[in-house]
Image: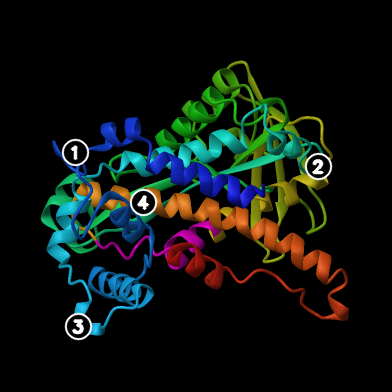
Amino acid sequence: MKLVEITADIVCKTLMDPHILENARRRKGAFTRNCGKLPLWTVMKLLLSNIKKTISATLDEFFSTLRIQAGMPIDQTIICSQQAFSKARAGIDHSIFQTCFDRVLDFLYSPDSHEYHKRLGGIWGIQFIAIDGSKIPLPNRKQLLALYGGMGRDATSPTAIASIAYDVLNEMILDAHFEPLSVDERTLAMRHLEAIKAKNMVNLSYSMFVFDRGYASKELITFVEKDICTSYLFRIRDKFNLAIDALPIPENEDEIVDQVIELYENINVRVLRFFLPSGALETLVTNDFGHDKHMFKEYYFYRWPVEEEYKLVKEKTGLTCFRGYSQNSILQEFWIAMLLTNLANIIKREADGIIKYNHPKNAGRKHSYKTNMNELIGCCSAD
């Protein structure tokens, strides 16, 4: 069985697991009879489909398709209101979609899985995990503003913070959080690290966690060094540390300053300073003392795919186009977006393999064929 089929089977079995459904039932008696216009499986399909369309358009399209498949006349199309759908989805806790997300990862990243062992090695013996956060605008509702906080003028625009830990080389979200603005990115980063270590998702001896500006702090660096015991690479902002600021800067754009200092008590770090092509001075801090200094420029740029992953999540899976206004509905759509993103990346990997096999040299084209993610996401959310 193909990997795509296995993961799809995991999702379907999870959604229909009676024990999981019992824990996810928010209303006594919800979906116990499974009859009427909106039985459980229909609600699940509607939540997972056409994620960038309005509820009204999704309902019309879904029931029109059912009528055509059944060969019924147009006047027998089932009419389902937005209110009925909203009431039905309110009976399902968001945790069921989080469980789907977790179970797919449990299969892919289990030490007993063939997929897990294919990941070992990475690039130059390193598996890169990028951690990053992003602000997510929410529907303009007072209850969401009270729950998550706000941004903009007078902080009146409801906004949440999402954070992910992203396996760069395997294009997979390993851990995700959706929290109020009052929870800072460093706290979320520590939660990611704890979860990855607890679940044994990667071999920490051969992993490097890459962070952008704003993450470096005594607490987080000490936590990664002492509690997680793995490699890290931080991009450092100006005036972060006086000892780092006092280090010499490169004399030209080709030089890399490479020095070891004691950043905190019993914590030595390697500081690398170099000029970017733009002329800006870049400073990186790591606890990797073994690799050549010239490799760290490339190491840091391995965090950039996490930015593209947020673009995929926000623009293509439609995370910011929320169709519900309650906290539960918001979290439903967040975990559905995380799940669909990982499923799309699994399909993309297999599709890219087929493209590479059928077009090994891409016939001398300037740009190689690659999977169209817009089409792929559309197919994922339509079936």
Residue drawn at 56 percent across, 53 percent down = 306
Query: Could you tell which of marks 2 and 1 lies nearer the N-terminus?
Result: 1
Compute the Cα span from label 4 to label 1.
Answer: 18 Å
- Residue 77 is left or right of residue 125, and the answer is left
Membership of 312 in magenta stretch = yes
Q: What mark, if any, has residue 26 been given in the picture?
A: 1
Residue at which label 3 appears: 75
Query: Could you tell which of marks 4 and 1 lies nearer the N-terminus?
Result: 1
Q: Which numbered disc, 4 or 1, marks the residue closer to the eye?
A: 1
The amino acid marked with disc number 4 is Phe
Residue at which label 4 appears: 334
Compute the Cα span from label 3 to label 1.
Answer: 35 Å
Q: What mark, if any, has residue 161 been given in the picture?
A: none
Classify 206 as above or below 257: above
Q: Are marks 4 and 3 in contact (CB under 8 Å)?
A: no
Give SS at disc 4: helix
Q: Which numbered disc, 2 or 4, marks the residue closer to the eye?
A: 4
Membership of 242 in magenta stretch = no
Query: Could you tell which of marks 3 and 1 lies nearer the N-terminus?
Result: 1
The amino acid marked with disc number 2 is Lys
Residue 1 x/y as whole percent: 67, 47
Residue 202 x/y as whole percent: 64, 31
